[in-house]
Image: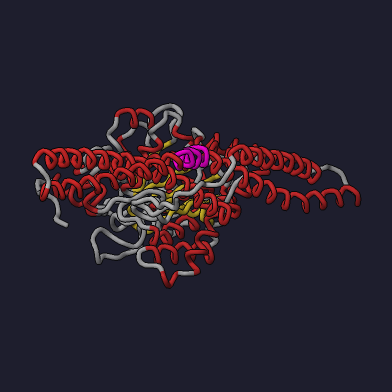
Amino acid sequence: MNLVSPHRGYPLERIEGNSGSMETWVGTFDRIAKDLGDLRDRAHRVAELPGVGDAISRARSDAQVIAGPVRSGIVDAQLLSSVLSAYADAYSAHAVPANRMIEEIQNAHAAWESAAGEAEQAGLKALWSSRSGPDDEATKANDDAREAMATADAAKKALDELWTSWETLYTSWDEAYDKALSSLVSGASVYLTNEEKALLDQLLAANDPAAVWQLWNANPALRDALADHYPDIIGNLDGIPYDVRAEANLRRLKELHNRLQFLSEPQKSEVAALWDEVEKKNGKLISFDPDGSEQTTAALWYGPFDAANVSTLVPGMLSKVNGIGEFGKSARDLIDGTGDAAVAWFGYDSPEVPEEPFMDRAQNGAPALRSFLLGLDAQPGSRTINVIAHSYGSTTAALAIGSAADGLGVDRFITVGSAGLPDDAQVLANLQSPDAPRIYATTSANDFWAPVGKVTGWGHHTDPASLDGVTTFDSDGGVDAAGEPLLATPGHSAHSGVNFPGQNAPGGYLLKGSESFYNVREIVRTGEPGTEPGGEGSEKGYWDLVAEGMSQGGYGLGY
């Protein structure tokens, strides 16, 4: 009896297989993987043998030659074991009970055919009796026909229920079979060994970047596979060494840059900006996530990875990766000739203008900055850690640094044109705790938006200059240690802007040549600003003139 299922058209046939035999092969592949793993471990130990001489050198060379193919064999054996084990489970769960139903369905089909035939004959008899037979015979024939049709309907319903159950089982088996074939065709190129997968799981589950660093450092034989197969994870995981992250992210950036002409905006200009910094400005791309947030996030490291003095620049409102080059230049100017390092950190979704009064973007961005700073502190060796934050970046940075009484290992927190620190009492207490970083602050007298931001903000009214022990410094012009003039910051911009669209002037908070930047650089170098407040060359700005006007009974100046 050649039957097919009524809904899916599956042939009613036995699904061949043997669960016991498959489990035996699973065990065989597991043993092969284990034996190859032991061989690989021995090869690694031989490759690391100390000593000199031809024999030792040949042994090391032979061990390295063996290690690569052995790993491939482990991957293949574990893939076969994993795929066959999953298929064996699916076969037992779906194919075996489907096979058991074949005879039941055949019997039910035969029963339905018989009942349907009997119902048809009973119906014909009832039709004949109603036309030519006595009334009592016609009545009996009609009753018999109704009973036969009810029996046929019940047989059809029972058969349909069996077909539905069988099709569900067959479909599940068929999907498992297709998945197994797909895994065998494509899985070997991206499949991790059990040890590598376990390490990846442990890295992702680690409590903090310090734990990530310890896990990574403790498993040198497993690291290359993770970096090769999961560059998007390894390239952005705080606690992973920065040289490893930079290499992983560069590969991803190259892939995008190779098809730059096919990218749409803003990704096209973002990739171009990052490529320019990496290829021409010696920036190292230590984080890169073009898809994980509303905005592309990235961070560029300038200078040596083992620098003893590292500064992180955090941008404010409207900062996008396609403009990271300006902060990259500030980072390079900051460390020029020093041997220090600096990071342009664009690791959060910065606010648009309507979002700036609120804390949402800071609350979303602070955990990412916190993780980055903990990762920086977790790297081996000791270093001075500085955070330099502009505008709303200071709001975000304060929320991150103030999340712990120890300041996350940050030594100096420098705010320029702050849009206001969070009003949260615990955050402010942590920022002023004995282990907190030393805080520095400047706001240009020409900066229209920073004071407005503090007044109009919801949840970030705190002026950093109001905190206990803060060191304030000027950004209104002056002279450097050699007597050379420094520019006053003309507005709120970190670079060449002023306060409003269309305005442009030099002297931004983080632009080389301004008093603000000169002081920031001196704080990073020495811990102290380089100019005296109100010293030679200082100029009166907008808010100075407003204050004078109000002191004379006026209402100040419009802007």
Q: Residue at x 20, y 39 (%)?
A: 144
Q: Residue furthest bottom?
A: 261
Q: Residue at x 9, y 49 (%)?
A: 554
Q: Position of residue 370 (x, y in %)?
A: 43, 39
What sort of colour scheme is used for the picture?
A: secondary structure
Number of numbered discs visible in the structure rendering: 0
Q: Is residue 294 visible?
A: yes
Q: Position of residue 377 (x, y in %)?
A: 53, 38
Highlighted range, magenta: 90-102
Q: Position of residue 146 (x, y in %)?
A: 18, 40
Residue 65 magenta: no
Q: Is residue 359 above or below residue 500?
A: above
Q: Quadrant of residue 407?
A: top left
Nearer the observer, 210 or 381 = 210
**Left or right: where 285 falls relative to 357:** right
Q: Is residue 400 above or below residue 278?
A: above
**Left or right: where 364 falls relative to 49:** left
Q: Residue at x 40, y 27 (%)?
A: 433
Q: Position of residue 163 (x, y in %)?
A: 37, 44
